[in-house]
């Protein structure tokens, strides 16, 4: 059964040639050279697009490399990742950063990949001169902005300035929305009180900080008539702000991640600094109702994309999560943020399909087709003639033996997974990348070459863009 | 360009054989017998599904017949209609009604068609014994219920009783939601004051009456865990209630109609009883903002279907709109309700695409694919292999000469259209029904045979159904 | 300290003469005849007004009589009650009912009292001819309407008809809002399944039924521009509807009762039919959050009045709660509805002041001054010169020994209280009725004569009335 | 008729001695020395409290002085003003500022007065050491913070820091909420385009900027459990945020001003730089619906205080509004902000009572009693024994001849009023300050001595304060 974002088709073949889908139909003609893969009634979904992945970023020294990360992606059904080239405050040009990052990835990814830019210092030169080049020449059509973290955060005015450019260029503007000042104050006082265990990470970043910044980001967007994506949304209130904006037809998009569907802040407790494994931002939330509200926001259409936010650092290694142990004492604010999740993303979402929380169409929409559209991956994310022949093929229900996840089943180079111990009754059986079987869970496992992935020059978003509707007689600069 | 509910594909062919889509792809093989239709870059959309049509109903004596109505549908790009067999209060069985109505339509429709049942007296025998037969043997999988009109209205308890059955049978439950008692009171007092001109029809049915009944219908649905469709929604507040319910994942669906996108209550004024032409219920609303809110509710996904609610009666004929002239005096409450709109439905919606109010995907979703899914027309409404080869093909933008609509351009048997005088810059160029060209606007016009349409036995809805979530420990009878 | 609805005054005297407050001030002149009561710093609040009390109503045969009920009121700090003369469906005139009820109460009440009318069959004669007489001659300026109970419920149209009259006459329209049809269906199916224990009473009347009917009642009110009071609100959603209406300035008022602040549906469980003691409608709700939401709606101003809805029947007596035991089997639907609460109402609300849930001004507003205003008791409910010298005087905090309530401490003639076992740290110390000390908890207890209470002819509400704002061009009959 | 925030009393006397209300009652005893003022049935309201007044502030050189401003207050029925001592960014101590400002006012105010502090640079020394002294020794119990203006604005973190102190000290925290960065960007681009006429002032500060900052301020308050007042609210959306917070019982207060009830942005247009007269921030809004929404927010209780925000500068003088003419060219961003309004505040609000928009109790609440409570003026704002004998006495309705306001009728030292040309049918007839008649409109006019006003050392707010309810396990520093 083929599933796309709006339909399910049964009993049809998919014809592939030269890495492309060339035909959909019944009883398609074959030749002796035709390789046939029988899904046996399992779902065939478009290859997963993970649009929020940190790999070999300067600030995650012990994390996955392009080879290990992309391998992990493939083995979890993901055929395309978008990773971040990241500006540091002192960088006055982003072109070298992007070039270096592209060079770093070249021939080292087994899945297809594209590149976002993280901007932390939007100088006029970068905004006015370099962004257009990125779009036009590099196919980099998205930027990520932070409202928090000392080394990353932008003031509202900087965000507004960038929005002028991204609106004009059609770039997708991703925003990490948490109120920095609230969090900063809380961290300082917690530290002064000696409340520095990993669990206080969750205490220090309340849902209110996310809700406020989300509302502010939406307001900036409405002011400028510039589409934005709120990344890794974790709070019901933030999701409501997004929904309210969408109700009014503002081009506001939302993303959530597996951790906000399954894990609670309780996980930040535990002996031996174990809680550090689950330190990410926004933090894990308090209650089952918080998780439910995230599932609801996928099912009712509030969320546009579902990504891993794979930002892994090893737990046991020097320079990994243990950076948060200062002289043996836990200091939550020093723990590198982020979780590994590239490989588990799709199985965790599919589990929600099996459990009736979302439909298979929702799955395709948030994990494959909408990220492809939002980020201008115009040959990805859908099973249609003319698209890349990227597929995730699932087991027919009932065929796979249930198993409990252990980290050694995974293909990343991280020494833990926050999802260990969970039981799965389906998992990507085959991953097909541009017509090649790169993962066959039952026979051969990981089959891709290290350089099998290609860099994808992206176009601009095909989802709703600026509306030319304004809040006063003022108009943003063209 | 092919458009479906979530994507647009350019440059691909659609292969058709024996009335079915057999293949989608590039450069499909042809033979000398292959008939090729070149869309020349115009949109190819699934044949329109008009899921709310009144034809030859006992209470519309001067309206369209099956031949004239279905012809009008075809010429407006619609390939499937669902019309109403209608119980009268005194009918103690609905099977004869349905059989008679089916017999009436047989061999007299040039488009494909299916049948809903209007229930006005849900006796236990009908609900418990006959509805299952309708679903199983007749492929009639939907009922329409009225909360207003003396001859039609059901009490809450009757609706609840029906919901027990429709939930169990998977039938789609359509509800006309207006508070009868409010309207009844207002009409009586207006008549007592001599305020009986057609315009008072709009005064007599305020948006509040619709909002109240909509909220009540949603409450009944939530109580019973039974999906419903609110038909012909005309008010922002009613749409908000639907949206709020959807946000909470209740299986609540909404429909609107062309008249609520384009026409204002001002149209009910005018000399010579002209206002009677625009009498429909809910009535036309007061302000441009009201129209805008309906467009918004299509674009943000609140509305599931877009139908004509074609319920035409002639203006000039005996027994038509003039029934509302009593001894030469206008009596708005006696004017037959309803407007003609089968043929203009799709062009009016497409106009919204051209004007940027909605996307072409929204068009397909509400006019073709979602009605097909909601009503179990499982071979209709989508361009996918295995589906019926029903298409509406539009002119490439810029190719068609703009024209101003006059009634003589239309193919219904009604002596007016409320949309006369509007300018169009596109219109269905070809209509294809199961592979046959039945409308070619430039060459030949209407080409179907009178019996070309087939009756479609429907399955049950494939949209979200009961959730097994309840408001107390009580459970509805299985 | 004197408390009114907006201020607290410390250190001032209240001068009383001939049953009236004649003066407020410091060091008021006294004579040898002056009786001085020293509040010792405890709060002096206006005498309680309990505007929702059922006494000697035809359908509560084992309940309190006027003497026992009014005694209980006085001992709980309440100086005025409004009780219900109740029409039965077959009564074609309400004047005899009112006259009989007034005669019944005459000289048998130790507190002041007034009379509401329950209408269950609004014939034109009653509505058009008798209501004006009630207002003008009897000082009966309020009616209560039911949307549920077979023997009481009115259709929307009947409510609308009554609203025409109450709007014109300035009568306060009280509405018991629960969707009858939902509840009826649920009761029938529960009974068919043998789920008839008292606990199923709560199951059978879900919050949704209240929320729906509340929204409908508000809609009817908005349509007619007629103020209403929603009585005994028990659900957050219903309170939200009221709040939303108030935000829009609709003259919608709300009432809640002590049981919805303190008791949960769990109380309906228990051996030996004990749950029957807590059967009331709307029923007790499920969760602590439900109770919290009612406190919130007092504190944020949503609720206008706080009444006991005293509707007591004995638990042990023939014809009391045991009517719900049919052949020894519990049948929840046959249990007489209602709880005793006249005497505990004020102490329970004051407890909320002590616990910081509401302010002392909120207490006065909902328990004294707003009910007096809403029901036209223009000499009651406030400590101002010219008003009746009715007071409840509380102990200075810390002075009273905490105690656990037992039923034998109460002065009603009911064999239980649902609030037994609760701990109190304050209680009305003195009750003063028109200048006479009628309750002195420490010395003498109940001091009133059985005929000490007077009938109060009421005026019309001084809270916000019709606004002359309408939902369409239609106007209600003047 | 005496009106307070919750009641109206007719036919009662107010006894005054030594500047205090000593008694309320009927037929109070008099002696030959008793001066009697007969209100003749006109409303007697508490003397007006104008809690937001700028007088002799360093940045309004051409504005009113203490003598002219306080005279204007008295002649408009206001007996108490609270004015601002204002820190400049470079000031490292606020004690001298406050002392200087107090010295400046001393013996130069004919009405009673108190002082707020504007903080623009909250150094630790000021926050930790000086604020406690202000509260304890100076009776300065409120601070005003700005989220906009280059010379005034604070970052979120600075506001949070201040909140720690104001929460602890019980100080009222006033916030001017507009998103600075949005406005800054807009002004820059408007100036670059040459769109610098006064009207663009309104364009440059959209309602969205106010709504965003209001939501943010509420979030900061919720985070810190610190009460705030949003000053001069002008937008419906901002008012809704406040209302939503109040619904949840957060201690959020709101204020609006006469200009937002009566004036539209259209007033910023006009020849000869006339629009500059109406430049204030937030700016006048676009539509009548905007004005209506402010009236609604008074009537439904959202707004707590109603102040003039008197911040006058002369139109014709050097250094006044004409600072916005640069080389003869209008530059809206250089026009001194603010309007005169001390004298017209109460008549404009009373007009709303006359027109049925609000009740007389609403008038007293927002113009007298709630500002007194919120700012700890514990002897002001209510007609109760023990309070200062401050009154505004109005004409009996119908007694005063309607007149059209001209600036020469006013007693300020400003050369225009934005309310000139409006027709009034009532006006303060007498103003009584601590028992002395200081304004008698018909006989003598302004009667106060220049040093008649006294400085009021304030206590802390008696409205709802911190709730000890927190958004996470974190607690603000005690």
Image (cartoon, coloured by chain):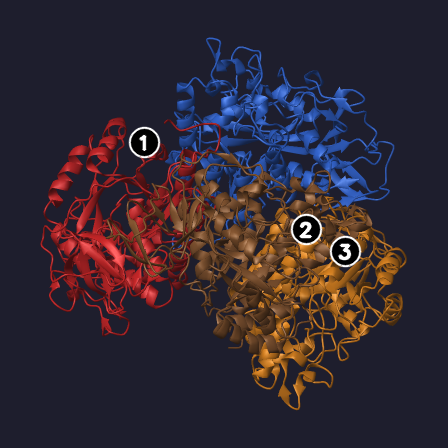
Chain colours: A brown, B red, C blue, D orange
In-image side of B176 versus D72 (left or right): left
Which of the chains bears the disc numbered 2?
A
Could you tell me which secondary element the residue under label 2 belongs to? loop
Distance Cα–Cα, label 2 vs label 1: 49 Å
Q: Which residue is mark 2?
A: A205
Q: Residue at (75%, 35%) from the top-left corner?
A: C354
Picture layout, residue A398 above or below residue A346: above
Do the residues marked 2 and 1 share a common chain?
no
C-beta proximity under 8 Å, tags 2 and 1: no
Residue A52 in the image: x percent, y percent? 54, 57
Pick whichever, C134 or C184, lies toward us: C184
C-beta proximity under 8 Å, tags 3 and 1: no
C-beta proximity under 8 Å, tags 2 and 3: no
Q: Residue at (63%, 30%) from the top-left corner?
A: C258
Q: Which residue is mark 1?
A: B165
Picture layout, residue D54 above or below residue A146: below
- Residue C440 visible in the picture: yes
Q: Mark 2 or mark 3: which is in front? A: 2
- Residue D398 visible in the picture: no
Pick whichever, C49 or D127, lies toward us: D127
Q: Which residue is mark 3?
A: D163
Distance Cα–Cα, label 2 vs label 3: 18 Å
In-image side of D85 versus A259 (left or right): right
Residue D269 in which image quadrant: bottom right
């Amino acid at each position: 059964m083929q599933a796309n974002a709006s339909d399910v088709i049964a009993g049809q073949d998919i014809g592939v040639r030269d890495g492309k889908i060339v035909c959909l139909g019944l009883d398609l003609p074959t030749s002796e050279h035709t390789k046939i893969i029988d899904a046996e009634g399992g779902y065939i979904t478009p290859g997963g697009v993970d649009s929020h992945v940190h790999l070999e970023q300067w600030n995650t020294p012990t994390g996955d490399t392009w080879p290990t990360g992309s391998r992990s992606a493939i083995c979890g059904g993901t055929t395309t990742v978008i990773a971040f080239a990241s500006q540091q405050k002192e960088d006055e040009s982003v072109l070298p950063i992007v070039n270096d990052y592209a060079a770093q990835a070249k021939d080292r990814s087994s899945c297809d990949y594209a590149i976002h830019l993280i901007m932390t210092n939007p100088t006029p030169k970068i905004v006015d001169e370099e962004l257009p080049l990125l779009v036009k020449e590099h196919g980099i059509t998205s930027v990520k902005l932070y409202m928090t973290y000392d080394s990353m955060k932008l003031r509202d005015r900087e965000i507004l300035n960038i929005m002028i450019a991204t609106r004009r260029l059609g770039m997708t503007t991703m925003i990490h929305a948490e109120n920095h000042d609230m969090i900063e104050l809380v961290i300082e006082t917690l530290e002064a009180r000696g409340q520095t265990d990993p669990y206080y990470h969750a205490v220090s970043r309340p849902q209110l900080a996310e809700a406020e910044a989300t509302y502010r980001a939406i307001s900036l967007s409405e002011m400028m008539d510039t589409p934005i994506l709120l990344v890794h949304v974790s709070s019901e209130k933030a999701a409501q702000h997004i929904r309210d904006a969408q109700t009014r037809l503002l081009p506001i998009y939302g993303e959530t991640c597996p951790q906000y569907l399954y894990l609670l802040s309780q996980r930040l407790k535990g002996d031996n600094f174990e809680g550090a494994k689950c330190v990410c931002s926004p933090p894990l939330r308090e209650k089952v109702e918080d998780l439910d509200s995230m599932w609801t926001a996928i099912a009712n259409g509030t969320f546009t994309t579902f990504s891993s936010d794979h930002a892994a650092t090893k737990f046991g290694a020097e320079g990994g999560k243990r950076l948060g142990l200062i002289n043996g004492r836990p200091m939550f604010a020093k723990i590198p943020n982020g979780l590994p999740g590239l490989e588990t993303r799709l199985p965790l979402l599919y589990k929600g399909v099996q459990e009736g929380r979302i439909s298979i169409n929702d799955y395709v929409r948030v994990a494959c087709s909408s990220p492809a559209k939002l980020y201008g991956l115009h040959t990805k994310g859908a099973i249609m003639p003319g698209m890349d022949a990227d597929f995730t093929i699932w087991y027919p229900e009932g065929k796979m033996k249930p198993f409990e996840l252990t980290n050694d089943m995974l293909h990343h180079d991280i020494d833990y997974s926050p999802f260990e111990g969970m039981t799965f009754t389906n998992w990507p059986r085959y991953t097909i990348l541009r017509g090649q079987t790169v993962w066959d869970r039952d026979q051969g496992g990981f089959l891709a070459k290290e350089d099998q992935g290609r860099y994808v020059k992206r176009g601009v978003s095909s989802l709703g863009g600026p509306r030319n509707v304004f809040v006063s007689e003022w108009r943003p600069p063209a």
